[in-house]
Image (cartoon, grey):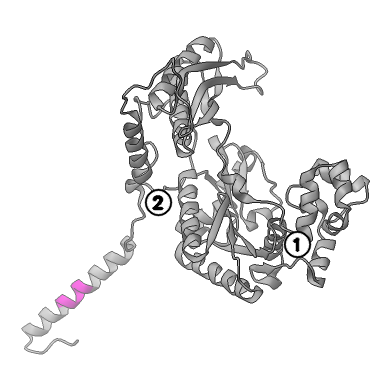
Amino acid sequence: MIGLVDANNFYVSCERVFQPKLEGRPVGVMSNNDGCVIARSAELKALDIPMGTPAFKLEGLRQRGEIHLLSSNYELYGDMSARLAQLLRDACPEIAPYSIDEMFVYLDGFTNDQCEALGRKLRQRIHRHLGLPVCVGLAPTHTLAKLANHFAKQDPHYQGVCLLNGQGHTTEALLKRTPVGSVWGVGRRLAERLAIGGVNTAWDLRESDEKLLRKRFSVVLARTALELRGTPCMEMNALDQPRQRIMTSRSFGQPTGIFAEVHNALRRNAQRSAEKLREQQSLARAVMVFLNTNRHRRDQKQYFPNAVIALPSPSDDTRVILDAVRQGLEQIHRPRYQFMKAGVMLLDLVDAEQHQLSLLNPPTRDRHPFLMATVDQINQQMGQGTIRFGMTDAPAAWQLRCAHRSDRYTTRWDELMKVGTHPGAVAAAEAKQQQKKQQALTSTKRGTQPRA
């Protein structure tokens, strides 16, 4: 049996853990640079505010206090996701993180009753330890588990835990009322093509001829149909496979054409890409640097350059990658353009352990692996960016706008949550204590015992 544990409205829920005043109120989390809404609470959805709504269109509602808009706080969300994964590892035989808020758990050998009981126990434990509301979908395949999780969220009858078998009247009834576009891996265009052939629901897809699906569409869709029947066909170990390229890019808080500012932004992106490269134990043979102007500003000159710099030998050394980034920027930077985005992509990746060293570039006794490992370890323990290569100007133009970001409560020492008593309550308690002392002093002068 496979379970999918999915946190409800994850970004908003993370904010509510540390700001209980947001419970029951319309809350939205904005994208980088506070551009548009990327996460909505149920209360915000009820106001018919669609996903992706530009934040400036909601400014009036925010100022009147009718809704709450928060800047994205990815450092907090990432840490909460890691805590959720660790909690599941402690309770389940095996897990496979699928996204920041979704984790597959594998319950081989468990009966249906045991799976349901564990699902309810996990919900309670996660809420007690992390304060996050989650729903659990249980099924014999990944695709059915995704649908079961959807029903667990949408139907109050399941109370957050839904179990679907490959066969059975309940599964049939639910699949018949599920649009085929809601099936995992079936996008809008594919759903339109399927509808032409009379495949409108998940049940229609389940009952479709496997060979015909493979011939007319793809092997993946044929496997999806088998998964809907309860036959496992998909493995999640692909998530553990190294990526073939690594890219880190960010939009700027405001446009800039100053070389130093663009360079600093690229340095930050390059350092993060190098960390990801070492995490998957790979080496890069080349580095691509790219810049974008604001394509929506027709009144400004447009320029979208990129440059690829080959490394002398495959490397995961941040310093080598930073040097390549500088070379690439020098080739493509033009001061007369106002850039709005910059990025770094590491290309032609190879496995660090299996890489065959070239005879033309014999290895040198470099201590960079130990240096990089030490830097990564400190940044993991003390927070990303604790140790950086080179100085950056905090108020630089490329820094992201995050005017409404909450504190990073779990990863920054200077932003830890403070526990205390309301100042008014403290003053009242001190006044009451002073009054008791005065009464005791008066009673003593009169020769009577003070009342308790």
Disc 1 target residue: 230
Near mark 2 (Cα within 10 A), the count class, few <14, some 14-19 or many ≥20, is some
Q: Which residues are magenta?
A: 433-438
Quarter of the picture holding the C terminus: bottom left
Name the residue at 32% across, 34% down.
370
Name the residue at 61% across, 63% down.
135
Q: Is residue 85 above or below residue 212?
A: below
Q: Residue 293, located in which quarter of the rendered image? A: top right
Q: Is residue 385 above or below residue 327?
A: below
Residue 436 part of the magenta-drawn span: yes
Where residue 243 appears, x then y in whole percent? 57, 36
Relative to the observer, which residue lies in front, 151 or 360? 360
Where residue 276 appears, x then y in whole percent? 48, 36
Disc 2 target residue: 409
The answer to whether residue 287 is left or right of residue 145 is left
User: Is the Cβ of the residue at disc 2 closer than 8 Å to that at disc 1?
Assistant: no
Relative to the observer, which residue lies in front, 188 or 1? 1
Name the residue at 80% across, 54% down.
225
Q: Is residue 236 visible?
A: yes
Relative to the observer, which residue lies in front, 141 or 118? 141
Q: Residue 1, located in which quarter of the rendered image? A: bottom right
Secondary structure, mark 1, is loop
Q: Is residue 175 above or below residue 367?
A: below
Distance (Cα) linking label 2 and label 1 = 42 Å
Secondary structure, mark 2, is loop
Near mark 1 (Cα within 10 A), the count class, few <14, some 14-19 or many ≥20, is many
Instruction: Name the residue furthest bottom.
Output: 448
Q: Main secondary structure of the magenta part?
A: helix
